[in-house]
Structures are given as structure tokens and as C-alpha cells.
Amino acid sequence: MAVLVSTDPSPIASHPGSLLLYTALTLFILYYISTAIYCVFFHPLSRFPGPRFAAFSKIPFALSLVKGTFAADIRDLHEKYGEVIRFTPNHISFTNAEAWKDIYNYRSGTPHFTKDKMNYITPINGVESIHSTPDDASHSRQRRLLSHAFSEKALREQEPLIKSYIDLLMKRLHEEVQGSKKGKVDLVRWLNWTTFDLVGDLTFGEPFRCLEKSDYHPWIAIVFDSMRAAMFIVATKQFPLLDRFLASLIPKSVMQKFLDHHNLSAEKMDRRLATKTERPDFVKYIVERSPDGIDLGEMHSNSTLIILGGSETSATALSGAIYHLSRNSAKLQKLLEEVRSSIKSEDDFSLNNLAHMTYLNAVLEESMRIYPPVAGYLPRVAPKEGISVAGHWVPPGTQASVTAWAITHSPNNFRDPDLFVPERWIDDGGIYASDKRVASQPFSVGPRNCIGKNLAYAEMRLILSKLLWNFDFEVCEESRNWMDQKTFILWQKSPLMLQLTPRKEVRSE
């Protein structure tokens, strides 16, 4: 029997281009499989637990950033795998309280973690800010120059201005009670209007007039949109070979918001620098104390950061405090009694007095624990020598971070982590005595912690105490599940609807 042998060339062999494509595809698949095997079984981080797919791919991480679910996702992973997890091929996350100081608190001249540029964005003008710069010397210089504006002395001089905006907030809320809405207000909006007006005035010498107009300044919407754009950018930076292509997929309107945010900040800063004034705002302190130390580009880059950090985070913390108080009547009543018994008149609302009110400050600490204003991660890169974190050896070049939402909700750090219990910050001998309070660091720790911490506490103490002194309130039914939120660096807060009622003593005055 004859055997027929086909002499027709294969489709691939007859098309050199197809052969090249087939070879390239085969090599890519082999490379990807071999890389996956290495990452899962032989990588220096393979000893750390985590999802198998995330061990060799950044896709789950990038998607969680874009979807706004990263904070919740990382907490879930820690609950499943433990206090140290691997959530990308080269990134580990910690919920051990010791990790804060091991990763973020360092001394110059010693091996330490550095800023990870893959996860931070250089401002549009190309000039690094105090937040974005990876260089320790640049950060130290900028922080030293900016710190004059956030000192205790500056805060004392700024106190009348701070109070004036909070008094205006109370006035407007009383008008809302007397108006057609009968005291039903979205507190998120009012708090954002107040803090943006205040920090806008302190930064640029002019408010956004949100409280005056009972509406957002168009620029504030741009600020919020720019944060979401930033998450898109960070997500694309996870794939260096594809980042330009992936960045091109981001809608132009989203990227325009990012550009507009910087340009409007720069315009306002230029206008303030051209104005001669003795008002104790940030620019006065910075320029007077360091006329030749900080250049215009750095002023532009840092102004966008200050506006966001000094306003949105305080409004977020206060929104969380009011929500949790409204859902815990016994805690609310206890705070009402402290505020109303300690403060007899408007003259008693001084920052010094409020700093010594025990339960007020415990409420704020607990609010920032259970609902940290910045819920996301703060990535750093291990030094070339490698370094130990919470008893775990971290190889050189490894990305490591602490995520506030995960560490403050870990039962290893706090008893009943999902319960709002201000007493855990006061009672050293009760059932919460074993809580690891150092696990809650809403302003971070170390040389790169939040420079505006004093201002934030001033805003929060004054606004919360004045609100409680003036009004009784309860959360409306539509805001019962207010905590169901996404995060794009900051929380994407939904309206917090409250029913305000003037306190009887205030009503009769």
C-alpha cells in the first residue's frame, strides 16, 4: 500500500510573518509561565502568604486601585492570611503595630526604607513636593521651610481666623434649621465647605466662599476628580512596559482635571505671592522665614498638597466622628455632657481648653482609628542592605507598606475592632487595656509624617465641640449605611444626612 505524503507547506511555514508571530507568542507564554513559577516558588518573598495569582501578577492590585476597593481588599487579605501578606510579586503589607516605626520612622545616615516612586506621582510642573520627593535631603529642606507655617506659634496667631470660619458654619447651620429644610442637612457638604474655605484662606489669602454661597467652588470638584485620576495613573505605573499605552486609555477629561487642579493652585499662589499682607497665613510664615529657601515651583507643587491635606482629611475625620456618635447614643450623650458642662460661653472655645477635654479627644482618636481619613497604603522600598520589619527580614528592593484601614481593624491590635469605643483611649485598666494604640497612626509616623497635624486637631476640636454645643442631632434613615464607601486615596463619601435641632439653651438665647 502506498503511503501518501503531503508536500504542501504548512500555513505557518508558508508565511514567514506568521512564523515570527507564532515564535514570539510561544516565547512570551514560556517566559510568563517561567516567571510565574519563579515568583510563586523561588522568589525571595515566596515565604510570605497571599493569593497565588497576586504572587506573579499586579493585575489584581491595579484593578483594586481603579475600582476603589483597595482598602477593603487588603483588609480581607490580612484577615485570611495573617499579619504579613504578599499582594503583588514584590510588595508586602503589614498589620503588626511595630511595622509603623520599622518602615516609616528612621534616622538620617542609617539604612532605611525610601519613598517608592512607582506609587507616587510627580506634580504636573515636574517639581517634586514634600509628599512626592524620594530624596531625603530635598524632603528635609522643604519640610524645614514649610514647618514655620504649621508651628504652634503660627497656630496661635491663626486661631481667630480659624474660629471665624467655624462661627460662620454655625450661623449657616442655624439658618438651615430655620429654613425650608427644617434642619435636614448633608453634613459632608457643610464640613467640606468649611475646611476648604479655611485652608484656602490660609494658603492663598482668599476663601473659596463655599459657606457664603452654600455650594462647592468649581475647583473643589476638580480636586476630588484629580484624586481619582491619580489612582488611574498609579495603576498604569505598575506595568512599566505598558504604562504609556495604558495611560492613553485614561479618558482625557479625567487627566484634564489633574492638570486643572495644578494650574488653578499655581494661579492662586501667584496672586497671593504678589499681595502684601500682614495676615498670619501660610505664605507669610514661609516667605518671611525662608525668602530664598523655597522656589516658586516648589510653592506651586506644595500648595496643591496643602489644600487637600488640610481640608478634605479633617472633613473626613469629622464626618466619621459625627456618624459614629449618631449611631452610639450613650457615647454621644457622654460627649454632650462633657462639652456642655465644660463650656459655658463662646469665650470658652479656645484651642488650649479643647486640647484638655478628655472624652472629646478620645472620640476623635477613636474616629480616626475606625475611619482613618487616609485609608490607603503608604509604600516604601527596602534599602540595598535589606532590613527587618516586625521581626521579618525584608530583602533589598522590596516594596513594603502599612494600610491604615487594615491595621486599625485587625483584632490582633484592637479588641472589638469594628466597634466605636472612645473609652479604649482613656481606660488603662479595663477590657481594652491590651489594645495596641500605637497601631493607629492617622498622621503616619517619622520624618515624613503629616506636617499639618496641629492644624487638623484644631479644626476637628473646634468644629465638633461647637456643633455639639449648638445642636442636638440624629442621622437620617437614608444615611444609616453611610460607611459603605470606596477609596481613591481618600474616601469617596456619600451624603451624611442629619436632622439638626437647636439645643434649648442656645435656642432661647
Image: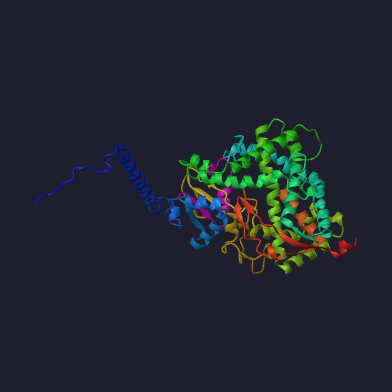
Identify the residue at image location x=82%, y=36%: 278
Left or right: 256 as drawn, with respect to 35: right
Rendering coords of residue 256 (x, y %): 61, 40
x and y percentages locating residue 504 in the rendered image: 86, 65
Q: In the image, residue 473 lies at what x, y percent? A: 77, 64
Residue 93 visible in the picture: yes
Q: Residue furthest top?
A: 292
Colouring rule applied to residues: rainbow
Q: On the picture, is 185 further left or further right than 8?
A: right
Q: Residue at x 71, y 67 (%)?
A: 328
Q: Which quadrant would residue 486 be assigned to in this image?
A: bottom right
Say above or below: 507 vs 252: below
User: What residue is drawn where x is 69% and y is 64%?
Assistant: 478
The segment highlighted magenta reads 89-118
Q: Residue furthest left?
A: 1
- Is residue 199 part of the magenta span, yes or no? no
Residue 96 part of the magenta-drawn span:
yes
Quadrant where the C terminus is found in the figure: bottom right
Q: Position of residue 431 (x, y in %)?
A: 64, 69
In the figure, 76 relative to 91: above or below? below
Asked if residue 143 shows in the view, the reply is no
Total marks shown come to 0
Say above or below: 413 vs 447: below
Left or right: residue 435 versus residue 155 is: left
Residue 16, picture quadrant: top left
Give the camera-side residue of 138 and 485: 485
